[in-house]
Amino acid sequence: MKFTQACDSCRMQKPGTRIFVATSLAISAMLLTACVVDPSELSDSSVPAGDAYRNGGVKGPLLPAGRWWDCFGDQELNRLMKQLDAENPSLAVALARYDKARAELGLAKADGSPRIRGDVRAKRKRDSSSGVFVPNDLTYNEFRTALNLEYEIDLWGRVRQTVSAAQAEADAAEADWAAARLSMRAELARNYFQLRFLDSELAVVRDSLRLREENRKLTSARVEGGETTDLDLARAETELEATRAELIQLERTRATYFNALAALVGEVPASFSLAGGGVKAPPGIPSGIPSELLSRRPDIVAADRRMDAAAARIGAVRATYLPRVNLVGAGGLSSLDLADLFDPTSLFGEIGPEIEIPLYNAGRSGIDQDRAFAESDEAVGLYREAALTAFREVEDALSGIRFLDREIEAHRSASRSAERAASLSRKRYEGGFVSFLEVVDAERTALAETRQLVQAKSARTLQTVQLIQALGGGWEMPQPEAASRHHAATDP
């Protein structure tokens, strides 16, 4: 019934009016089609994927999601993580950028709403005597108070596409914040474990230093007793001072990590303190880590959302150069005499559409579209780069863990053998069977092997942290309930 009435209404119009309406509808449909982004125009964003990694195969308990550092069982590390979340300046900067992106999203959404502004005027005017309408008095007063309405009718989706782009950018900024938080937490864990393993290495060197002092005293007594020469004493003193120099070097390196930890948790080194403690064995890695875990990496999420933002901006740019229809209106009171301003006869009002039609812009529309497509290609390239980097980082961490486990076992056996050889050499020297040079060589080897064992354990723990970071915060698949609450809350 409504369709028949509409057709009858069209037939009642003049022929010129019907032609104008039909032509306008056809042009509108053509322009609306033109502003839609064809997905085939965008570059292919696919990345190679696999069901497993080449270097999988090590087993262990699953790491809890969220507070991934809990798997190390270190209360001091837990305390530092909490302080980092509250005080780290880099995280505050990333959060401010996220807040800025959310504000820009709010501005974009506001563009799709009507804008109403008040207008109050009191003017003294003088009109030209050569105009079309010449008032009795060329000089007069004008008083006006009104409300003005402006609303863009989003025929071509410019506002919608702009909002979509702003939403995607806000999501990307949120992912950037999450990436900064993951990076800072991993950096804190690395510095903390390096400091702890340096403490273990310092303990080894201090024990060796005490042994070197005993050797020097023993050698000095043997020289005084005529049992050996000053050459052995010189060698003992050389080894003692060389070990002391190594101890000082390690203490200097430890101070660097201590200062880095202080900066990460927002403190100056002078006021920062760290409770004593050791390092437990790192957690094992479960076999069969799914590649889908990479989809939760914040940098990949950010790159993906920026692809969406670039695609939306293409549509927004195209719509910018199409006719823009605005609904405008004004209503209020206007009078030449202030005393008559609030008289009912001073009421006025107007409402209706205004159409802006861009006719010539020196090719600006095409250039803007080329730029938008170039930005889209850049976003696709950055996404592919982030995805491939993620696969490489996971593979590097998995292979590093696998080889370091084997290296630790080799260093452990070598360290035991070297300690036994050093003990036997000292006994043989005290019995007068060998020279002090053999003792020096055996103890130097034992110290080196023990330190290499500690360093290999440190590297194994750091590789575990690297794998956690490469997987976006652990290797447990997130639960559906947790994924649905992603925007409602953040992990602790």
Image (cartoon, grey):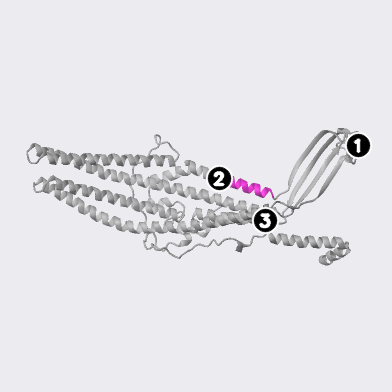
User: Can you tell which mark lies on residue 97?
Assistant: 2
Q: Is residue 170 left or right of residue 411?
A: right
Residue 153 in sight: yes
User: Can you tell which mark lies on residue 289?
Assistant: none
Which segment is the magenta one? 99-111
Say if 379 sits above or below 97 in the image.
Answer: below
User: Can you tell which mark lies on residue 135?
Assistant: 1
Residue 368 coordinates in the image, percent (x, y): 64, 53
Q: Name which residue type carries label 3.
A: Arg
Q: Was residue 267 drawn as part of the magenta stretch in this picture?
A: no
Residue closest to the eye, 143 or 249: 249
Characterize the local packing of mark 1: few (<14), some (14-19) or many (20 or more) Cα atoms within 10 angstroms: few
Q: How far apart are marks 3 and 1 (CA)?
A: 47 Å
Mark 3 or 1, nearer chain start:
1
Q: Which residue is drawn at 78% across and 61% down?
A: 25
Residue 459 coordinates in the image, percent (x, y): 34, 51
Q: How far apart are marks 2 and 3 (CA)?
A: 28 Å
User: Can you tell which mark lies on residue 318?
Assistant: 3
Give SS at disc 1: loop
Q: Name which residue type carries label 1.
A: Pro
Mark 1 or 2, nearer chain start:
2
Say if 219 sits above or below 384 in the image.
Answer: above
Q: Which residue is drawn at 44% across and 45% down?
A: 81
